[in-house]
Image (cartoon, rainbow, N blue to C red):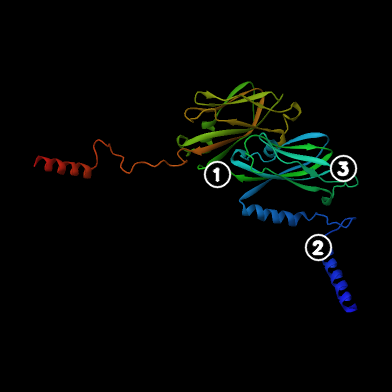
């Protein structure tokens, strides 16, 4: 009996030592989930199996009370070339902590709210920037429609280190082609017109625009007073004017963050005629991003096997008709 107790005690000591090598424990003896690299690697493998991708947004901000994180706007600021219209939001995970461990986070997609999640933390470690002091929170979209706004509503004294959007590519029958036209911060004053077809041809002389449909245009631009306007014109149709944001102190800055993302949708069902963007105000344009789709790339309608005029008929049909006439005459 004594030998059995001795063997059991030695086994427990061995297992405890092995756990101590692999994991860290806090003052209360519970496991600290700060092994971010392993968890990220596991999650990356999980995402790759589901054909999803990550969009990382670095923040490092401190929020008090009620605040809203506008995820689409933040993603566009740090990743200007993203086309979120072709993406479906699966979930959001972010690294954050609250001072009293009672912070709340809620995902809002369009007009639908997800379940609220608690953000952990404590007073002693709130101002410590070590990775283990942050909590990892995951908000699921639960199959909600990805149309409209993507936002996180925060309530409490919260620090957010980074946000990661988990998105999937929408299934479409057509391929969207994205063209980037650099404008190098060119300045426009008063009323001006950007001729999009002409700008595309200067960069891609061999592109046949007659075979393309324009979906939307994204301008990376800024206005001096934040009251500039941009309007998309397709043929004889004009869209609603979109505001081009900005501030006087950031107008002469070369930093990418000083430019705002302005999305202009095609106001017409057709892409015939001119493609233009009308600018009004004191505006600088860094980049024009054009989203095109090839015509006729959707589902193909089944056509008749014989496209000839049915009145005339086929050769075989005419020969059969002649035989019947001969028999009747006989």
Pointer 3 residue: 100
* Left or right placement of residue 121 versus residue 211 in this view: right
Q: Nearer the viewer, residue 290 or 299?
A: 299
Expressed as whole percent of the image width and height from the top left, the position of residue 311 reads 25, 35
Helix, strand or loop under label 1: loop
When the figure is inspected, residue 314 is found, relative to residue 280, above or below; the finding is below
Mark in front: 1 vs 3: 3
| Location of residue 46 (image quadrant) | bottom right
Whether residue 44 is visible: yes
The image quadrant where one finds the N terminus is bottom right
Q: Earlier in the sequence, mark 1 or mark 3?
A: 3
Quadrant of image for the C terminus:
top left
- Does dot 2 land on a helix, a strand or a loop? helix
Query: What residue appears at the point 51 percent right and 32 percent down from the top-left corner?
Result: 197
Residue receiving disc 2: 22
Q: Relative to 238, say whether 138 is above or below.
A: below
According to the picture, the residue beneath numbered tag 1 turns out to be 171
At horizontal 88% and vertical 79% (from top left) the residue drawn is: 3
Q: Mark 1 vs mark 2: which is more N-terminal?
A: 2
Question: Is residue 326 positioned above or below 249 on the image?
Answer: below
Q: Quadrant of residue 123?
A: top right
Residue 216 x %, y %: 57, 33
Residue found at x 64% / y 43%:
143
Is residue 255 at all visible to an observer of this figure? no
What is the C-alpha distance between the residues marked 1 and 3? 43 Å
């Amino acid at each position: 009996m004594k030998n059995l107790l001795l063997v059991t005690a030695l086994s427990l000591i061995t297992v405890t030592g092995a756990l101590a090598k692999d994991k860290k424990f806090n003052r209360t003896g519970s496991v600290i989930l700060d092994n971010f690299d392993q968890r990220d690697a596991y999650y990356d493998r999980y995402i790759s199996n589901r054909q999803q991708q990550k969009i990382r947004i670095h923040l490092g901000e401190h929020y008090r009370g009620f605040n809203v994180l506008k995820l689409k706007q933040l993603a566009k600021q740090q990743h200007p070339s993203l086309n979120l219209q072709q993406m479906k939001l699966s979930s959001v995970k972010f690294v954050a902590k609250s001072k009293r461990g009672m912070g709340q986070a809620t995902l809002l997609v369009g007009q639908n709210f997800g379940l609220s999640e608690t953000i952990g933390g404590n007073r002693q470690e709130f101002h410590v920037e070590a990775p283990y002091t942050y909590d990892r929170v995951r908000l699921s979209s639960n199959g909600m429609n990805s149309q409209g706004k993507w936002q996180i509503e925060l309530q409490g004294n919260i620090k957010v280190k980074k946000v990661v959007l988990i998105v999937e590519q929408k299934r479409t029958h057509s391929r969207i082609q994205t063209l980037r036209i650099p404008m190098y911060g060119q300045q426009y004053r008063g009323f001006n017109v950007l001729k999009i077809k002409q700008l595309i041809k200067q960069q891609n002389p061999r592109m046949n625009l007659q075979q393309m449909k324009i979906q939307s245009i994204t301008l990376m631009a800024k206005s001096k007073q934040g009251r500039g306007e941009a309007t998309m014109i397709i043929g004889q149709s004009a869209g609603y004017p979109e505001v081009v944001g900005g501030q006087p102190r950031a107008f002469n800055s070369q930093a990418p963050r000083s430019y705002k993302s302005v999305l202009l949708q095609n106001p017409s069902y057709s892409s015939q005629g001119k493609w233009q963007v009308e600018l009004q105000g004191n505006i600088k344009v860094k980049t024009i991003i054009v989203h095109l789709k090839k015509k006729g790339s959707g589902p193909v309608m089944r056509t008749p096997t014989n496209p000839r005029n049915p009145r005339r008929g086929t050769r075989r049909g005419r020969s059969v008709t002649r035989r019947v006439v001969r028999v009747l005459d006989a």
